[in-house]
Image (tube, rainbow, N blue to C red):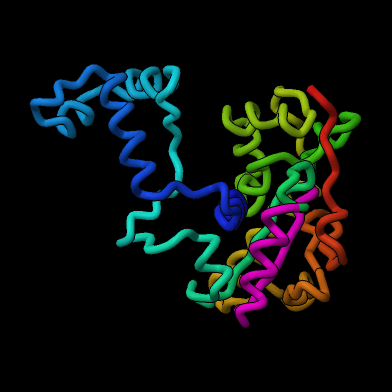
């Protein structure tokens, strides 16, 4: 889990009554006829119209997890805190230039491991060769997907990847890659496949990845180094200001 770690933060949840109130305001901004089928009219609106209406003053519409009492019976933060969530093996982490390494990543790992569930934490620090040569550039949100799914070099040309590169202080030109990048991609994919297969990401001869605990605070550096280290909070590297 990467982006999803933020869901353990109490401010990243919307209660049903708040979501319904926002829906009413959104409908009004879309000029729906309240005397007719409101849902049918809203569903017929284009996504462009929905975004425009949602950004109007006073609407305050944004996509978020809604505690509806059925699919999600209580806030995710509460489920992790009281231990009612499923105790499945979990890998949670982020990339070197993401501040969540200091906040939601260790928070989710602490709560999950404290509930007795096997937990592993990572920091992805690898950069393709072209970006490694750029001063200040650090691994940014989403970059690890290109490696974990073995998509080097094609994934490095993705418009999404190039758009996100700015967040790491990197240029938005397709970066060069080298044998190191191909090796890290192959190894990362092997580690993730091992986790999917066995529930443990360690691979003999490649990755000895210890389980996380709040007291131990061990994480795995996913890079050419592939090594276990301590103190995930201190592994965050702030990207240069844009």
What is the quadrant of residue 205 in the picture?
Answer: bottom right
Residue extending farthest bottom:
116
- Taking the spot 53% from the left edge, 77% from the top edge, the residue there is 87
Can see residue 187?
Answer: no
Could you say where residue 151 lies in the image, as x and y percent from the top left? Answer: 60, 45
Relative to 37, say whether 226 is above or below.
Answer: below
Q: Residue at x 39, y 17 (%)?
A: 52
Q: Measured along the vertical axis of the image, is residue 34 above or below residue 212? A: above
Q: Quadrant of residue 234?
A: bottom right
**Looking at this view, is 51 or 169 the one in front?**
51
- Magenta segment: does it hold 237? no
Residue segment shown in magenta: 103-126
When the figure is inspected, residue 172 is found, relative to residue 100, above or below; the finding is above
Answer with the quarter of the image where residue 232 lies: bottom right
Rendered location of residue 161, percent (x, y) = 63, 33
Residue 42 falls left or right of residue 240: left
Q: Residue at x 45, y 18 (%)?
A: 57
Q: How many marks?
A: 0
* Residue at image coords 73%, 76%: 211
């Amino acid at each position: 889990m990467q982006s999803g770690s933020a869901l353990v933060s109490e401010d990243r949840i919307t209660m049903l009554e708040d979501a319904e109130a926002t829906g009413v305001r959104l409908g009004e901004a879309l000029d729906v006829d309240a005397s007719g089928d409101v849902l049918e009219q809203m569903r017929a609106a284009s996504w462009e119209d929905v975004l425009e209406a949602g950004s109007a003053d006073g609407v305050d519409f944004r996509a978020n997890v809604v505690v509806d009492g059925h699919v999600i019976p209580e806030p995710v933060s509460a489920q992790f805190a009281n231990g009612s969530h499923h105790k499945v093996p979990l890998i949670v982490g982020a990339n070197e230039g993401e501040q969540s390494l200091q906040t939601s990543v260790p928070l989710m790992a602490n709560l999950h491991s404290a509930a007795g569930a096997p937990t592993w934490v990572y920091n992805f620090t690898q950069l393709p060769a072209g970006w490694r040569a750029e001063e200040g550039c650090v691994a940014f949100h989403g970059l690890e997907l290109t490696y974990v799914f073995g998509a080097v070099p094609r994934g490095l040309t993705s418009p999404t990847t190039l758009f996100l590169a700015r967040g790491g202080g990197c240029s938005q030109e397709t970066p060069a890659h080298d044998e190191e990048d191909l090796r890290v991609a192959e190894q990362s994919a092997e580690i993730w496949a091992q986790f999917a297969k066995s529930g443990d990401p360690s691979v003999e001869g490649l990755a000895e990845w210890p389980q996380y605990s709040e007291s131990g605070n061990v994480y795995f550096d996913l890079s050419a180094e592939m090594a276990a280290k301590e103190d995930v909070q201190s592994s965050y590297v702030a990207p240069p200001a844009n």
